[in-house]
Image: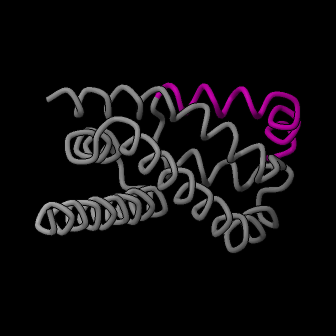
């Protein structure tokens, strides 16, 4: 009985460590805008962690990484770019103010490059909460499909 408890404890520990590794990796991939790696991570997490845990871990990491890139770009890039190109960004600002949430969901669903989407949104007047919600909604279907595909293998 003691061996069974020890085995169960080591399995839970290894699952937790693996989940934390996937969380950190997906956060880093999204924060640095590395293209086309998220589907591979999602598939792998489904294989190694299972469906529900894999979806939760990859979704959390993706959201954290996207938000980090958004905040960093807004903090350090938006000011200098705005000072130089503000007169040309007025129309862009109006469109994003009206329909930014829907544009962002569409871009996420379509699979537009993370680096481009997050930095462009950081230049816009889109609030950080709206960015996070649209990112979550837009990335969820692709992550769920990839994790589910990985979990059935």
Across and down, in percent, residue 30 comes to 45, 56
Going by the image, does 91 lie left or right of 6? right
| Residue found at x 60% / y 51% | 118
Q: Locate residue 91: give its quadrant.
A: top right
Across and down, in percent, residue 65 comes to 52, 59
Going by the image, does 133 lie left or right of 152? right
Quarter holding the N terminus is bottom left
Q: Looking at the magenta stretch, what is its main secondary structure? A: helix
Across and down, in percent, residue 21 comes to 32, 65
In the foreground, 11 or 39 = 11
In the foreground, 78 or 87 = 78
| Residue found at x 51% / y 32% | 140
| 109 to 136, vertically: above or below | above
| 106 to 128, vertically: above or below | above
Q: Is residue 19 magenta?
A: no
Q: Locate residue 8: give its quadrant.
A: bottom left
Across and down, in percent, residue 13 comes to 28, 67
| Residue found at x 53% / y 48% | 116
Q: Locate residue 117: give its quadrant.
A: top right
Counting labels gives 0
Q: Which residues are magenta?
A: 88-110
In the foreground, 126 or 17 = 17
| 112 to 21, vertically: above or below | above
Q: Is residue 99 magenta?
A: yes
| Residue found at x 25% / y 43% | 40
């Amino acid at each position: 009985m003691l061996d069974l408890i020890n085995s169960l404890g080591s399995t839970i520990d290894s699952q937790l460590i693996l989940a934390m590794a996937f969380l950190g990796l997906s956060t880093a991939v999204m924060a640095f805008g590395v293209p086309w790696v998220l589907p591979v991570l999602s598939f792998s997490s489904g294989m190694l962690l299972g469906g529900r845990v894999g979806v939760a871990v990859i979704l959390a990491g993706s959201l954290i990484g996207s938000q980090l890139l958004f905040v960093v770009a807004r903090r350090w890039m938006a000011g200098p770019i705005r000072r130089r190109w503000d007169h040309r960004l007025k129309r862009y600002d109006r469109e994003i103010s009206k329909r930014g949430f829907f544009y962002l969901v569409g871009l996420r669903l379509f699979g537009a490059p993370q680096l481009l989407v997050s930095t462009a949104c950081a230049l816009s007047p889109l609030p950080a909460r709206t960015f996070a919600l649209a990112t979550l909604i837009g990335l969820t279907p692709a992550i769920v499909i990839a994790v589910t595909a990985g979990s059935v293998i």
